[in-house]
Every structure is written in structure tokens, then in C-alpha cells.
Image: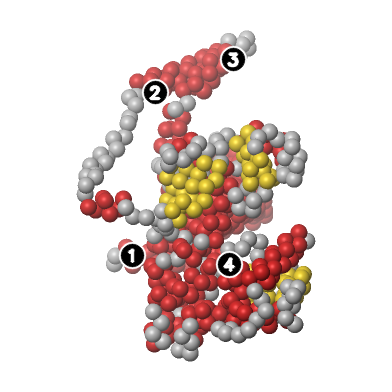
Amino acid sequence: MPRSALAPMALPAAMVGIVVMMVIPVPSVILDLLLTLNIAAAVMIMLASLNVTRALDLSSFPSILLIATLFRLGLNVSTTRLILGSGEAGDVITAFGSFVMGGNVVVGLVVFLILVVIQFVVITNGATRVAEVGARFTLDAMPGKQMAIDADLNAGIIDDHEATRRRSEVSAEADFYGAMDGASKFVKGDAIAGVVVTLINLIGGLIIGIMQNGMSITEAGSTYSLLTVGDGLVSQIPALLISISSGIIVTRATGTSDLGTDVATEFARQARPFQVGGGMLIGLGLVPGLPLVPFMLVGGSAMLLGFRLDQDADAEPEVTELAEPEPVIDPDDPAHLRRSMRVEAIGLEVAADMVDLVDPARGGDLLDRVRALRRKIALEIGLVLPAIRTRDNTDLAPGTYAILLHGVELAVGSAPPGKVLVIADDLGPYAGEVVNEPVFGLPAKWVPELQSTQAEALGATVVDRASVMTTHLAEVARTHAADLIGRQDVSGLLDLVRESDPAVVEDLGTSDVALPQVQWVLQELLREQVPIRDMVRILEVVGERARLVQNGEDLVEAVREVLGPAITEHHARDGELAVITLDPMLERELTAALGAEAGVTSLDAGGMQTIVQNVTDLTVQAESAAHEPVLVVSPSLRRPLVRLLNGVPNVPAVLSFREVGPQVELVTVGTVPIPTGSAT
């Protein structure tokens, strides 16, 4: 029978055997064999724990710990039955008792108790605490590890299979330390059981020897104490080895080799401690009253070893890894030219003196932040940004950076090396030129990093350079998300929907909805900062309404109405939606002027300008009162009004009454009046 077929049967058979051993008397010959097997198994488990490079290499260790503990308890029951029943327990127990006791009962009992204290108080308690702390910290670190895996996946560093493997490993690590936290209690209970069983054997043996077998107190004490101590030692030595193994497993950090090799390699680089430590030992040997020979012998050996390690380090040639020669690129190669002329969808360029931000060796974490930013944007608006190419540009002024969209410089900012951005109401205490924070336009100053603690103490907001750049990049990405979603991105989103809701994608085909039409709808939604995460409902509406409407704008409005509660929730604060409304007469005038193809209205260009200015003023007033208002109008007027306000700063988002969800309470913060002189 092959080994793969025997493995599933061996463990259940062993567990049944342990239970049978507790019930049925075991002959001393077989018991000797089982006791030897117990010691051998403990030694092999300890050696295996020394050879692992990480804890998960022995992920079954908690279960092994339980089985080994049950096996020892089963042996304790069998040996107790044999000791108390026949006054003998086989050659192994007798040999251990005779060798350790050396004819002295007290010595044997003391040695046994010392082993119990070492196992129970020192090793088991320490391993239990380490496992408990390891389980807590592993669970606390799981979200961060999962986010790092998702960020690498979104950045294209790893594929789906590698991401799945890493997630499984993180989950397995948490499960392992949690199981070890509980399994360590088995070892603690086993130590207590060993002491109890030893007392039972000793007291019960004395009673049986004197009262049933007619022995004298001295004879009974000598016979049963030898067997009891031998039994305790045969049980406690494997238990001690298992406890050491559990301590090694839970304290084992991930290494590149087994524990012995790692320790030898690491200490081989520490010549100075051996030299200093050896000198101190020799000095102690010269103190009057202390034995000179052992201190001189050990101290001299340590110093010689330290000098030898120092010489080996000096003599060891510096090994330089030969990098693979980079392939010679022909600048005239058509394939190279095509790659060179490719225009990235979004890019970040930094000046030559800002390369430290992207160099991990110098503490730069800008690339990691950019990767995390892609995941954040994806969760916020439902669009996975294209890979953001970051590179240096010697043409940029020192301390500046540029954000490019399809190769065109869209935004420029500054982040001088060695400085932090301080944002405060009073910038007087800080030296330097007043600048505007790139996202919100708040007044700020770049000050030396050494003044950051002082600025925070004064209540100012301190932002490091990398945070300024990633925040600016995020704002540009959100604002221009419509320009970043390409045909391939839409195809990928459709593939995701096809995996979970294939009928929705099939319905698009039957409705003759082409990929460019879906892309246009998504672009229009993103242009007005509407998240497209709910792709299933978006595609359902597109597939349904495409049969009924020919106008693409009407299709977008239909999608917005379905997404209305989500749009409302995006603008609401604490269950309240701050709204600006239009005077009813003004709404009728605007509908005639903007919504109708023909019609007579008294609103001229000057009146329109007045309306826009009124909307802007009300928005600023609401924001000064800590509100983030939206302009709510009739459905037929929403789209024309968006076109009217397009490009005007400080204007709110425009929603129709049909888009306002029922889950929020409307709070009117202003009404736009009809311009003076208009028809009534």
C-alpha cells in the first residue's frame, strides 16, 4: 500500500490505540517499547522545530502537541496500573529510576520536581505568553497585510494566484498562532497531571506495599519511590522536549535557513562581543578567591574565537553579485520606438533633487503611497486607475513636481527637500513665502522639518512632502476620472460583471448596446463625480433604457435616478442633505430658456450671469457655515443647468428631485431668487 494511502489511516489508528491503552492493561514489554517511542517522538519533534525556517512550516504543530500530550497521559495511566498492580513497570522505568536516584530517594524526587518547575514555570508559561501575543498581533496586522496584497495586485506587481496564496498564508498564520495559544494550555495541564500522578504512585504504592504486600515501610518506600521517580522522569523528559519545541516554534521568526545555521551565521558577524566577554571572564579569574583555571580557559577560548571571527571577516573577499548584463537596445529598433512613443494615461514627474522620495534605500515611500492611492480610488469611485508612471525630469525646477494626463502637464506643485508644509490660520510665526495648498487652496508655508514639532505644538497642521504630492495626485485623478477610463477599462469592468451577473451583460448584447456607448455613460457619470462601483445596476439601466431612448443624455439621467440614493449619501452629512433651491418663478424661466428648444423668455445674458453669481454666493455662505450644499432642481432642468455652471468655480453639485434619496433629511440653506427686472 502506498504511503499516501497509509497516512490518513495511521493517525486515527493511533488515537484509538491511545484510548485502548488507557482501558486495557499493557504488558511491561510493550510498555517499554511505547515509552521508548514516546521519547523518540519528542526528540524528532524538537529537531523538526529547530529545522523549520518559519512557524507555518509546521502548521500542524498544535494538533501534534495535543496528540503527544494524550499519548503521555495514556502511558501514565498504563504505568500507574502496572506499578500499583504488580510492583514493577518494565526495564525502562526501572533503569531511569535507578540511574537518576543513585540510591537516594530525595535526590530523585528533587530532580523530578526541578524538571517539572522548568517545564511548567519557565518554558510553558513563556511559550503560552508568546503564542497569545503572537495571535493578537497577527490578527491586528491582518487588515494591513490584506491591504498591502490588494495594493500589489492593483499595481500589477502580483497576479491573482499569488494574491490568493498570500491571503491564504496570512489567514493560516493567524489561525496557527490562535491554535498555539490554546494548545499551550495542554502542556501546562500535562505538567500538573505529571505531579499529581507522581504523588498518587508514591502514596498509593506505600499503602499497597505495606497493607497488601506486607512490606516494611523502608522496603515499600525504596521499591515504589524508585518506580515512581522513574515513571515521572520517563514522562517528564519527553514533555520537557515538547515544551521546548513549542517555545521554539512560537518564537521562531522567519529566516532563510534552520535555526542553528541562522544563529551561527548571525553570531559569526559579532566578533567584538566575544573579545570583550572573554576579557571580562579572564579579569574575573584574577579576582582573589575565584577559581582561575575555568575562567581563564573559557575566557581565553572566547577571546580566541572573537579574534578568529574578526580575521575571517577581514580576509573574506567582498562578494559582488554579478548582475545579468542588460540587453543592448537598438535605439532605431521599431519595437523600442513604439514603446518609447507610448503616452501614459497618467504620470508623475519629479525634479532631480526629489528622487529621495522614490528611493526606498533613502526612506522614500512615494511609490508605495501611489500604489495604495490606486486602491483607494478604486474603492471610492469604482475605477482602477492605470499604472501611474513616476520618473524624474531634469527640466523641472528644483523642488517641484508635475502631474501629467495623457502626456500633457495638467498640474504643477512644489515640495522642497528637507521641508514640510504648515497650514495654519496664523502663519506669522513661520519664516518663508506664503503658498497655497494645492488641493483646497489654503494658505500655507514650507518650513524646515526641524520646526514641525514646534508647528504642531502651536496647533498647525503639518503635512510631509509625500502626503502633499499623493493628495494632489488623488484630487487630479478624481477630477479627471472621466478622461482616464478607456475602452479597455470598460471591457475589464464588463468582464467582472459577467463573472457574477452574466445575464446583465448578455442583455446589453440583445439591446445592441456597443462598448463605446457604455464608456460614454460611465464618463458622464464620472465627470459629475458619481461613483460607478454599482456596475450591475448601471448596466441594467443601460440595457433596459437603450431600447426606449435614443438620446445619450437621457440615458445618463435614467442611470442617475437609479443611483440617486447613493449619490445623495455621497453628499449628505450625518443624515442631512444641505440643499439650495431655485425660486419657482426662476425655475420656470430657466426651463424656458435652457430646457426648451424654442420659447420666449426675459432672461438675457446679464440675467444668466446674475443667476450664476447668486448660486456661487449662496454656496460660499453655506460652506462658511460648515455645510456642503447641493443645488436641487427639476429633472428636466438638471442637465441644462449643469452645462450653464460648467467651469464656474465654487458651484455645488446639481441634483434632480428624483435623485434625492428618502434616507436623508433635507435642510434648505438658501434659495436662488429671480433676477430683478425679469418677467413675472
**Other-residue count near label 3 (Cα within 10 Å), few / some / many at <14 / 14–19 / ≥20:** some
- Residue 660 x/y as whole percent: 67, 78
Q: Nearer the viewer, residue 53 or 46?
A: 53
Give the alpha-carbon distance from disc 3 to disc 4, as whole Å.
86 Å
- Reading the image, the residue beneath label 1 is 4
Give the alpha-carbon distance from disc 2 to disc 3, as whole Å.
29 Å
The local secondary structure at tag 4 comes to loop
Q: Which of marks 3 and 4 is nearer the N terminus?
A: 3
Q: Earlier in the sequence, mark 3 or mark 1?
A: 1
Residue drawn 62% across the image and 79% down it: 593
- Residue 367 x/y as whole percent: 48, 48
Q: Please, what is the three-letter code of the amino acid marked with disc 4? A: Asn
Q: Are marks 2 and 4 in contact (CB under 8 Å)?
A: no
- Reading the image, the residue beneath label 3 is 284
- Reading the image, the residue beneath label 4 is 646
Q: Quadrant of residue 51?
A: top left
Residue drawn 76% across the image and 40% down it: 458
Residue drawn 61% across the image and 74% down it: 641
Viewer-nearest of labels 1 and 4? 4
- Reading the image, the residue beneath label 2 is 313
**Other-residue count near label 2 (Cα within 10 Å), few / some / many at <14 / 14–19 / ≥20:** some
